[in-house]
Image (cartoon, grey):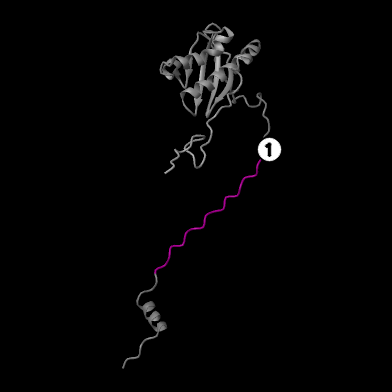
Amino acid sequence: MKKTESKKEKKEIKKKVAPPAKKAVPKARKEVKPKKLQKAEAIPAEKAPHVEEHKTETRRLPEKKRPPKVVRYHGTGGRKTSGARVWISEGSGKYLINGRPIENYTCGRKLLLKMAMEPFVATNTLGKYDVYADAHGGGVCSQIGAVRQGVSVALTQANPEHRPVLRKSGLLTRDPREKERKKYGQKRARKRFQYSKR
C-alpha cells in the first residue's frame, strides 16, 4: 500500500516541477512636489509692454433702430380651481391666453368673450391694451374668470384711477364659490338617493 502524500509534500513537488512566474512589479512614480504659491504682484504696463489690455467692446444699436421699451403691468387672478397670471401693455387690443387668441380659446362662446372684456368695458379702455395670460387648472369658463380678475388687477397698476370703478363692479374680488364636497350616503353634496318604501 502506497502512503498518501501529505499536502506539504505535494506543494514541494509542484515547486520543483514549475517554479513560480515572477510578477511584474510596477515602477514607483516620482513624487511631484507642489510648487510654492507665489503672491500675485501687479505688474505695471510699462514693465510688461508685451501684455495688451483686453477691452470688451459692446456694440449698441443707434437710438433710431432700437426697439421701444415695452412697459408691462402684472396681475394674478383665480376662480374655482383655476389660476391665471396676466401681463398687459399698451397696444392695439391683442388678447392671448396660453399663446392662443381669445376667440379661438373660448371656441366663439359670446358669454365668455363678454366676461373677458368686462374690465376694459368698465374702464373705457377697450382696444388700448394688449393682454398676455397664462391660465392653468379647471375648465375654460373658470380660466376666463381667473384671467378677468388678473386683467383687473393689472389695470389698477397701470392706472390707479381705475380702482374705484373696478372695485364697485366686483371685478377685483375673487369669487369664493367652489364645488361643495360629496357626502357619504348621498348621491351628491345635497341630493339623496331615491327612497323606496317597499
Principal secondary structure, stretch drawn in magenta = loop
Left/right of residue 190 with respect to residue 156 in the rendered view: left
On screen, residue 177 above or below 113? below
Q: Amino acid at mark 1?
A: Lys
Residue denoted by label 1: 39
Instruction: State the quadrant of the N terminus.
Output: bottom left
Q: List the single residue furthest toward the bottom.
A: 1
* Residue at the image point whose x is 66% and y is 26% from the top: 47
Q: Which x, y percent locates residue 95?
A: 48, 14
Res 106 quadrant in image: top left
Q: Which x, y percent locates residue 183?
A: 52, 39
On screen, residue 67 above or below 55? above
Q: List the single residue furthest toward the left.
A: 1
Left/right of residue 107 with respect to residue 166 in the rendered view: left
Q: Which x, y percent locates residue 10?
A: 38, 81
- For the residue pair 148 and 183, the one nearer the viewer reads as 183
Left/right of residue 159 with respect to residue 93 in the rendered view: right
Magenta residues (range) = 21-37
* Residue at the image point whose x is 51% and y is 16% from the top: 116
- For the residue pair 40 and 160, the one nearer the viewer reads as 160
- For the residue pair 16 and 169, the one nearer the viewer reads as 169
